[in-house]
Image: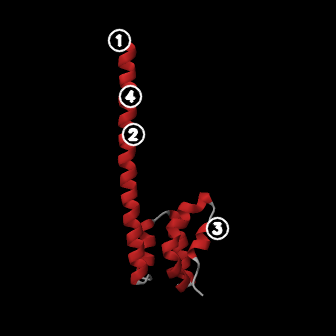
Amino acid sequence: MPLDWSALEDVAVKESKDLWLILKPFLPALARSGQDIVDGFARHLLDKDWAAVDQLMYQRMTPEERRALEDEVLAAARDAAAARFDRIRLEKDIAFKLLLNLVLKLL
C-alpha cells in the first residue's frame, strides 16, 4: 500500500515542517534500504553533513525520486533568491525612509 504523503505532511507539527521537507524525498529510498543505510542517514543528518546524506542516498533513489529531489532543490533555491531580493529591497526602502525622515526633521 503506498504512503499517503499529504496525510503524513498534515500530521507533521508546524515546528517540524522544515525537517519534514528535508526528509520527505529520502523516505521511499530509506524504506527500501537496510538498517546500516538508515543508521548512516541518521548519523549524517544529525551531523548536518548534507553532502554525505546526498552521497549515501542518491545512488539508492530511483530516477523519478532523484528528479523530484532536484526539482525541489531548484524550487527552494529560487524561493531563497526571491526572498533575499525582497529582503534587500525592503532594507533599502526602510533605510531610505529613515534617512528622509531624519533630513526632514533637520530642516
Residue that label 3 marks = 11
Marks 3 and 1, how far apart in space?
A: 58 Å
Nearest the eye: 48 or 58:
58
Residue that label 1 marks = 107
Image-based side of 81 in relation to 22, left or right: left
Q: Is label 3 or label 1 in front?
A: 1
Rendered position, 96 above or below 82: above
Marks 2 and 1, how far apart in space?
A: 26 Å
Circle 2: is it few (<14), some (14-19), or many (20+) Cα within 10 Å?
few
Residue visible at 51% across and 66% down in the picture = 21
- Under mark 1, the amino acid is Leu
Marks 2 and 4, how far apart in space?
A: 11 Å
The answer to whether the residue labelled 1 contacts the one labelled 4, judged by CB atoms less than 8 Å apart, is no
Nearest the eye: 98 or 59:
98
- Give percent across and percent down for residue 36: 54, 81
Circle 4: is it few (<14), some (14-19), or many (20+) Cα within 10 Å?
few
Q: Which mark is residue 97?
A: 4
Residue that label 2 marks = 90
Residue visible at 53% across and 61% down in the picture = 18
Marks 3 and 2, how far apart in space?
A: 34 Å
Report helix, strand or loop for mark 2: helix
Which circle's residue, 2 or 4, is located before the other in the chain? 2
